[in-house]
């Protein structure tokens, strides 16, 4: 990997590879994004990563757009574009070919087996995302309490998640954390 | 929160072998772009919900079964599920150009918004009031993610799927606690999980 070279090519290489390994979608890839952005390349610190996750959840669109935000902070608009296309491109091409292949042999039971095998993996990856993000945003017991309350509310009610996020923002603004 | 759980309903895994039924409507390229842009921009609480509403209910481009089948395919492929769905869906109607049109609609407009937010953050991220708000939002956002994890775990717990739960826990520890690289963990965990699942199903079938 050319971590010392052009930041755009590092972004393309990093997210292009991650795209093909991101089993279970963007939220399962967050530990890997954190490891690469914070620990390997030092593009940002823990706090900034947590901020970027928060912004990506507040904006509309698919949650893969967290890579747009990471790309921007590394190399501006070009970085945002490069990171997004690299994260979506390879898997989109793969999806195109696999869907054409499966249209011809739709009786295969492999899709069901692969899906059943990958579900626990992607839940485990998302659990790891939750842990890593909690360690970087919940720096006080009040913060931990807000996270716990948000988790319980989202688990037990059908409240629109945007209201929970805004409530968290309001508490933060009030200086509770 | 655009949670994968809300993007992954318990899709029927045994896809029925449907005849090549033609949907009543055939979208054009511009129509694909606009439809996916609308779904994406509405998608605060999971784009999938809006995708289903748009594709199945509103435009009647697919039946509910066809939609579930297409989504099941996109869920087991790596990468962002909804991005895969846009490409597979668009290309089914209009070939590669259709796939690109749907993808551009899904990702383009929200990407512009995300870039603007990133620029604002880079410029004003150090302002004290904004820092406090973002700190609060990120606490809540982590809570939402944790809720999604528990929601997705419930079916495994109900089925008493011990193998699945052990694999889940092992991946959680390897990535979350030991902080091992993703590729290494997946190179071990994917073949292992596939092998065990295949073996167990063979035994049930026998």
Image (tube, rainbow, N blue to C red):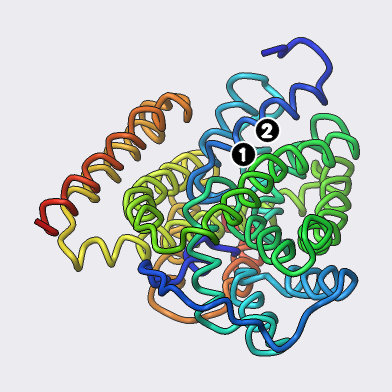
- B73 relative position to B14: left or right: right
Q: Chain of mark 1?
A: A
Q: Residue at x 58, y 22 (%)?
A: A39
Q: Residues within 10 Å of mark 2 (few under 14, many from 20)?
A: many
Q: Position of residue A109 (x, y in %)?
A: 34, 58
Nearest the viewer among A29 and A170 is A29
Work out whether disc 1 and disc 2 sit on a shared chain. Answer: yes
Q: Mark 2 — on which chain does it sit?
A: A
Q: Percent x, y for residue A68?
A: 77, 44
Q: Is residue B193 left or right of residue B112?
A: left
Left or right placement of residue A66 versus residue B69 in this view: right
Q: Nearer the viewer, residue A105 or A17?
A: A105
* Residues at discs 1 and 2 in contact (Cβ within 8 Å): yes
Numbered badge on residue A133: none
User: Does A27 appear above or below B140?
Assistant: above
In front here: B83 or A131?
B83
> How many C-alpha atoms fall within 10 Å of the one at disc 1: few (<14), some, or many (≥20)?
many
According to the picture, the residue beneath numbered tag 1 turns out to be A19
Which numbered circle lies on residue A16?
2
Position in image of residue A84 (x %, y %): 76, 43
For mark 2, give the secondary structure: helix
Taking the image as shown, residue A161 lies to the left or right of residue A87, namely: left
């Amino acid at each position: 990997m050319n971590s010392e070279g052009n930041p755009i090519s590092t972004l393309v290489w990093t997210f292009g590879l991650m795209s093909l390994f991101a089993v279970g979608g963007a939220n399962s890839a967050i530990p890997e994004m954190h490891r690469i952005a914070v620990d390997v390349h030092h593009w940002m610190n823990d706090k900034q990563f947590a901020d970027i996750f928060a912004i990506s959840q507040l904006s509309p669109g698919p949650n893969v757009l967290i890579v747009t935000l990471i790309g921007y902070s590394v190399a501006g608009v070009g970085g945002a574009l490069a990171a997004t296309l690299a994260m979506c491109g390879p898997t989109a091409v793969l999806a195109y070919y696999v869907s054409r292949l499966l249209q011809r042999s739709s009786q295969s039971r492999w899709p069901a087996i692969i899906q059943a095998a990958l579900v626990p993996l992607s839940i485990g990856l998302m659990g790891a995302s939750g842990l890593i993000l909690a360690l970087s945003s919940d720096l006080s017991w009040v913060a931990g309490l807000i996270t716990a309350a948000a988790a319980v509310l989202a688990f037990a009610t059908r409240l629109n998640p945007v209201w929970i996020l805004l409530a968290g923002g309001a508490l933060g603004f009030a200086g509770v954390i | 929160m655009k949670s994968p759980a809300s993007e992954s309903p318990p899709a029927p895994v045994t896809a029925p072998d449907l005849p090549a039924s033609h949907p009543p409507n055939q979208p054009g390229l511009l129509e694909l772009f606009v439809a996916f842009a609308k779904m994406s921009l509405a998608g605060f609480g999971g784009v999938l919900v809006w995708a289903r509403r748009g594709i199945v209910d509103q435009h009647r481009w697919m039946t509910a079964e066809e939609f579930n089948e297409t989504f099941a395919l996109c869920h087991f492929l790596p990468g962002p599920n909804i991005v895969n769905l846009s490409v597979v869906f668009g290309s089914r109607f209009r070939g590669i150009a259709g796939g690109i049109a749907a993808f551009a609609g899904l990702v383009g407009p929200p990407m512009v918004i995300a870039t603007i937010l990133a620029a604002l953050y880079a410029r004003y991220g150090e302002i004290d009031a904004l820092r406090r708000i973002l700190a609060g939002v990120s606490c809540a956002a982590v809570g939402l993610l944790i809720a999604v994890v528990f929601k997705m775990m419930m079916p495994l717990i109900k089925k008493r799927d011990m193998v699945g739960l052990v694999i889940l826990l092992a991946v959680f520890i390897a990535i979350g606690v030991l902080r091992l690289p993703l590729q290494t963990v997946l190179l071990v965990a994917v073949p292992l999980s596939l092998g065990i699942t295949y073996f167990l199903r063979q035994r049930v079938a026998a």
